[in-house]
Amino acid sequence: MAAGHDGRLLGNGPDAHHHSTPVHRVPAHLKVLVLVGFMLVVVATPHQWWPLYVVWLAVVLGVIATARIRPLWMLSRMLIEVPFVLFAVLMPFIATGERIDVLGVSVSQPGLVAGATFLVKATLGVMASLSLAATTDPVDLLRGLRRLHMPEQLVSIMGFMIRYLDVITGELSRMVVGMRSRGCDPKSPRHWPTLARTLGALFIRSYERGERMHLAMLSRGYTGRMPEL
């Protein structure tokens, strides 16, 4: 089994000061409530109230600075936002409505406003979520979700996802090493069919591993939650 993660959901590097900031010490269930409330407020903010977005950004940056999250760590994890960025960039070109010229290119004004608003809201959401992930232990987060009365099965699924994320990632790394040893370059479009078959094999292995885990849990009396010993 691959080595476990460093405690938080996404780690914060070797120089992180674990539990050394006020943000780290906030109970996990309160962090979740604050995050959900913040996301709802950001989503509900009309695009005409753009000064509020500056306030929301200042709040997120204040949390990041207080938690001593490294900017480079934050920026590298924000790459997960790339699909949303691409969608936001396309919106001015595919949307209908009044057309305006921007740098000599005709774009839809409603689409431009919607794309910019969508990008700002998505960025704020990603930054806030990463702040939670960087300052919260997975075990504390699961306990916090139980305190918030989230359905037990959902909490269990999240727990298994966190527990086996390193295992699946390690298995994928070994499969990629095997591909490279046979002369396949996963980054080359010529070898993408091989990469697709590798990912398919990884999915089947993960599915079979999940089935074995489920049978093992049933044999130990699992009925939605593990019995008390």
Image (cartoon, rainbow, N blue to C red):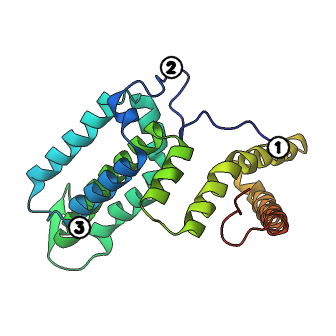
Is residue 145 positioned above or below 208 on the image?
above
Crowd rating for badge 2 (residues with CA inside 10 Å; few <14, some 14–19, many 20+): few
Which residue is situated farthest in the bottom direction here? Answer: 96
Query: Residue 121 placed where, x, y %?
Result: 28, 57
Of circles 2 and 3, the one toward us is 2
- Name the residue located 48 percent from the left edge and 24 percent from the top edge: 16
Amino acid, disc 3:
Ala
Residue 15, numbered circle: 2
Q: Quadrant of residue 196?
A: bottom right
Residue toward you, 97 or 38: 38
Query: Residue 111 placed where, x, y %?
Result: 23, 70
Residue hosting label 3: 114
**SS state under label 2:** loop
- Name the residue located 22 percent from the left edge and 44 percent from the top edge: 57
Amino acid, disc 2:
Asp
Residue 174, numbered circle: 1
- Residue 106 in view here: no
Is residue 114 positioned above or below 13 on the image?
below
Residue 138, numbered circle: none
**SS state under label 3:** helix
- Name the residue located 64 percent from the left edge and 37 percent from the top edge: 5
Which residue is situated farthest in the top direction here? Answer: 15
Spatial CA distance of label 1 from label 2 is: 28 Å
Residue toward you, 20 or 204: 20
Circles 1 and 2 in contact, beta carbons < 8 Å: no
Image check: 192 left or right of 63?
Answer: right
Amino acid, disc 1:
Arg
